[in-house]
Image (cartoon, rainbow, N blue to C red):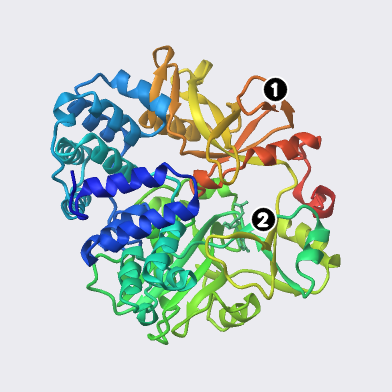
Amino acid sequence: MTYSPSALIEFAQTAENIAATSKRMIKASILGDYFNKLVDEDLITAARFFAGYIFALRDQRTINIGGAALQTAITTIANIEKSKYQERLVKLGDPGDVAFEVLSDNVKSRQLPSTLTLYSLFSKLEQLAAVSGTKSKTSLVTELLRLATPLEAKYIVKLLAGDLRIGLKEGAVEDALARSFKVPVAKVQWVNMLTGDIGETAILARHQRLEQAKMRLFHPIKFMLASPADDLTEVTKQMPQGFAVEDKYDGIRAQAHIGMGRKGEDSLHGIVINDCRVALFSRTLDEITGTFPDLIESLAQLISDDIDNDLILDGEIVPIRGAKILPFQELQKRLGRKQVKQELIEEVPVAFIVYDILYANNCVLIEAPLKERRTILDSLRLDTEKVQRGLHKQFDDISGLDAEFTAARARGNEGLMVKDLNSTYKPGRRGKEWLKIKRAIATLDVVITAAEVGTGKRARFLSDYTFAVRTSETEPTLLNIGKAYSGLTDAEVTEISNWCRAHTIQELEHGRVCIVEPKLVLEVTFDRVQPSSRHNSGFALRFPRILRTRTDKPVEEIDTLETVQNLAETTHVNEASVPPNERSCTRHL
Ligand code: AMP
């Protein structure tokens, strides 16, 4: 049977074909052929869907549907018990794959004709974004999936869960667009970054109009990240021409967009104050403006003298009282809240510490060297209590680094960032042009995979957490590496316990143990890493303790088995008890 290219089943079949090959070039060519067949309107939708989005990145709408709502919708249509769904979810690990299996077993779904189109699906998803409340959302999803064949349902559910899982990232969609429309891939990437919409980029590429793209604010640009320094000689090796040394602030990474005259545009991210729009984005590219209303006025103030000077600033939001930076745990109280009450704003005051600038004077600055970006940053009036300039010194050699590290620790910061003065800003890249010199104790960023009921006063809570690392940067399979229950306050345990209950995918031992969606990242410390057959990673942590949750860190960025192996090779004595100013960075790198 042949379908029109606009049919959703064609999209699903293309996704299946892409998933069936591991070769990047073949994936790009299948995708390119498919794109070529689509009319403009469908191309916009399909490019976004294949990049894992539903709306343009600059569009503030979200679908916001949880695993529990998907489970209710799928089990209702397939007419199966929740336990059966959960069993399959544990086996397959992806709700879309489960939907396909259970709906294929259902005669009604199996015999449905394919009637959905890219357009009709997109309209339903717009409705879904517009309604609020789990109940209404669940009934809309149920209604939608009732119209879908098992294969269509598979990809609708994957889209709703936020990941198609067919070995395709946004970069591969950019490759395919360049291929099918015979334009340079670097140009496609640049325009996608400017517009914040892979759909619009696709149209500009098809019509050979990439040159006309203009920078649009109010969509997040991916953040440049740092690599850990193995030792200080690496600094000399990587940055022979001189480097900048900055404090490594212990807060959350944030990007601020500030621009005038966009009051009526409701679909944009941000808040309008005194005719100026301000939006804040987190490292996970989520909007966090509502969590920090106390920063908005000072940020808007930055362009009050020059309304033509839109800005994009990169920096860290830290908890701070007067000149004193407070421990990260304080900031934790404000994270994850869409709105914060005045009492909390007063209890945990914050400031935005700016250390980079990506847009100013109508120019995108990411291709300018850090030295130049810093000069522009220095020309801004960043001297309010709420918006401050990050400390920044330029050095030619490493002899002063020990003293800088000690001073940064004494100021309450985590360590140092060392940056190549000639480096351009590379969105989304973790390179060696930025090196981080962190706390002296060994830590790992891990993700919770299971939670167990505690003992004593924690008997009512899921307070013992099993956690995992990723197999490697490119292989996302999670491998358990330890279990910890100490290090958190009662309030933190209550919060994590509630989160785990809401994100349970399977209950074992009558609810005493819950397998949870692997989404919540923890930073843990330990005395040493040792080989062990207890966990499937082949390693275990001795005396693990939880330092904090890292809601600002996506699971794609947790530590890998390779880091664990490296840690196992060196015996780490935990130095948490040594006062910060007695630790030297050279000693512990
Ligand atoms: P990590 O979370 O250990 O991977 O370290 C990277 C993070 O350090 C960044 O995402 C920022 O949130 C944070 N950071 C703190 N200070 C700086 C700085 N001066 N420059 C860049 N990143 C910084």
Residue at the extreme top of the image, as rendered: 509
Q: For the residue marked with disc 1, what is the amino acid?
A: Ser
Rendered position, 167 above or below 396:
above
Q: Is residue 176 above or below residue 63?
A: below
Q: Is residue 485 above or below residue 370?
A: above
Instruction: Name the spot of residue 446 as percent of width and height, x first.
Output: 57, 38
Q: Is residue 130 left or right of residue 500?
A: left
Q: Point out residue 116 in the picture as x, y percentages from the top left corner.
A: 16, 46
Q: Residue at x 43, y 12 (%)?
A: 509
Res 279 seen here: yes
Q: Which mark, residue 227? A: 2
Nearer-N-terminus badge (2/1): 2
Residue in view at x 44 percent, y 84 percent: 362
Do callouts 2 and 1 mark residues in contact (Cβ within 8 Å)? no
Q: Is residue 31 left or right of residue 581?
A: left
Q: Taking the image as four quarters, which one is ligand 1 found in?
A: bottom right
Residue kind at label 2, given as amino acid type: Ser
Q: Which type of secondary structure does the marked residue at label 2 adopt? A: strand
The answer to which of 231 and 501 lies nearer the viewer is 231
Q: Secondary structure at mark 1?
A: loop
Q: Which mark is residue 532?
A: 1
Identify the image quadrant of residue 548: top right
Furthest residue toward front: 1
> Which part of the image, by quadrant, shows the N terminus?
top left
Apparent side of residue 274 relative to residue 4 in the rendered image (left or right):
right
The reply to whether the residue tagged 1 has its Cβ within 8 angstroms of ligand 1 is no
- The correct choice, above or below, for 31 with respect to 263 in the image is above
Cα–Cα gap, marks 2 and 1: 28 Å
Residue 460's spot in the image, x, y percent? 43, 20
The residue closer to the viewer here, 388 or 348, is 388
The front one of 37 and 45 is: 37
